[in-house]
Image: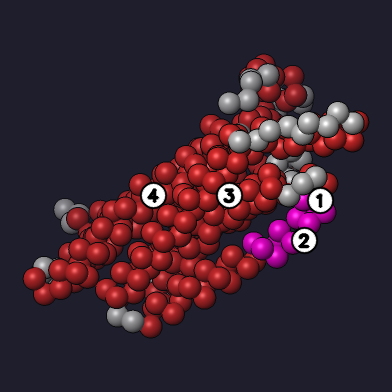
Amino acid sequence: MVDTSQALKIALVVVSGAAIVSNVLAVVLFAATKQLRIKYYGFAFNLILGDIVAPASILLTAVNFPQAVAGQLFVTSLCAVELSILAIAVNRFLALTITPPARYDAMVTRGRMLAACLLIWVISAAIIVPTLLYSVLVARMLQSCITLGILLITAVVYCAVFRKISRYTPPLASTEGVRADDAVARTRLRQTRNLMITFTIILVTCFACWIPSCTVNFMIYFSGKSMSVGPQNLLILSRLVATILMFNSLINPFIYWWRIREFRVSMYRLICRGRGNADPENDVVTLQTMQEPEN
């Protein structure tokens, strides 16, 4: 009979494997779709990368990869995911704040976004790796504090963006140039609202999946010797909360599919090609999906 620890290990490996497959598919769809291969989704791509690296590090531990290295990779990638969600809100806040829109486009180039994505990983390592110098319990407590801090800051920034959206007022001038800028601003406003709703859902699921991990880490740390947690129980708790965190990485691609129309269309086209349809553009499901109104 399989014990609880072994069952959780199997569940963790299965969920991690499924998370890798779903996010690799998301990478393929983002890379293959012109409408998604834009800087508007730059930090979303970085988020997907983090959702691949985190479960991959779990699978590395299952094949006897050095646990210290895999553990550092795991916590660093989770931090990169959280910072990427924050970066999406900061980016859209700048898009609404910097006017005219052409000025934002000149400032926020693809090269700078790529540099920002790399910087997110550097910052994540710089924040998380030093915590590993302490004992396991202290490290987990510090990592939980850092995680909650990042998520709370992210929530505040998201609220600021939604407030910016609600208070948008078109310019009073009626010149041709101003009208053109206003049209671009309104389009960007609509795109930002849709994107922010999507990643607010992702932020909420991230909160929900991190709460059990943070709660367990705080309980074990602050209870001290009054709470008898043996090595086996600690292993069970660790695998349980890791499985929940990997479930977060698993469901994100389904949120993309639900909320991003171009993502759905691209997936249907991929399915049609797999079925041998020479002209997936004429597939009824694809055309119906393309005609769906924006949420």
Q: How is the image coloured?
A: secondary structure
Residue sitting farthest toward the front:
172
Amino acid at the residue labelled 3: Ala
Looking at the rendering, the stretch of residues picked out in magenta corresponds to 104-117
Amino acid type of the residue that numbered disc 4 sits on in the rendered structure: Phe
Taking the image as shown, residue 117 lies to the left or right of residue 77, namely right
Name the spot of residue 192 as percent of width and height, x first.
64, 39
In the rendered structure, find residue 111 and report the number of the disc placed on it. 2
Q: Secondary structure at mark 2?
A: helix
Q: Quadrant of residue 140?
A: bottom left
- Of badges 3 and 1, nearer the viewer stands 1
Residue lying at 44% horizontally and 80% vertically, measured from the top left: 130
Disc 3 on helix, strand or loop?
Answer: helix
Q: Is residue 93 left or right of residue 222?
A: right
Q: CA distance from mark 4 to mark 3?
A: 16 Å
Residue type at mark 1: give it: Arg
The percent coordinates of residue 244 (x first, y second) are 34, 51
Residue 214 horizontal side relative to residue 77, left or right: left
- The kind of residue on which mark 2 rests is Gly
Residue with the mark numbered 3? 89
152 and 40: which one is in front?
152
Question: Could you say whether the residue bearing mark 1 is in a helix, strand or loop?
Answer: helix
- Which residue matches tag 4? 207
Magenta span dominant secondary structure: helix
Name which of mark 4 and mark 2 comes first in the sequence. 2
For marks 1 and 2, the one nearer the N-term is 1
The alpha-carbon separation of the residues under discs 2 and 3 comes to 19 Å
Q: Residues within 10 Å of mark 2 (few under 14, many from 20)?
A: few
Give the CA distance from mark 3 to mark 1. 19 Å
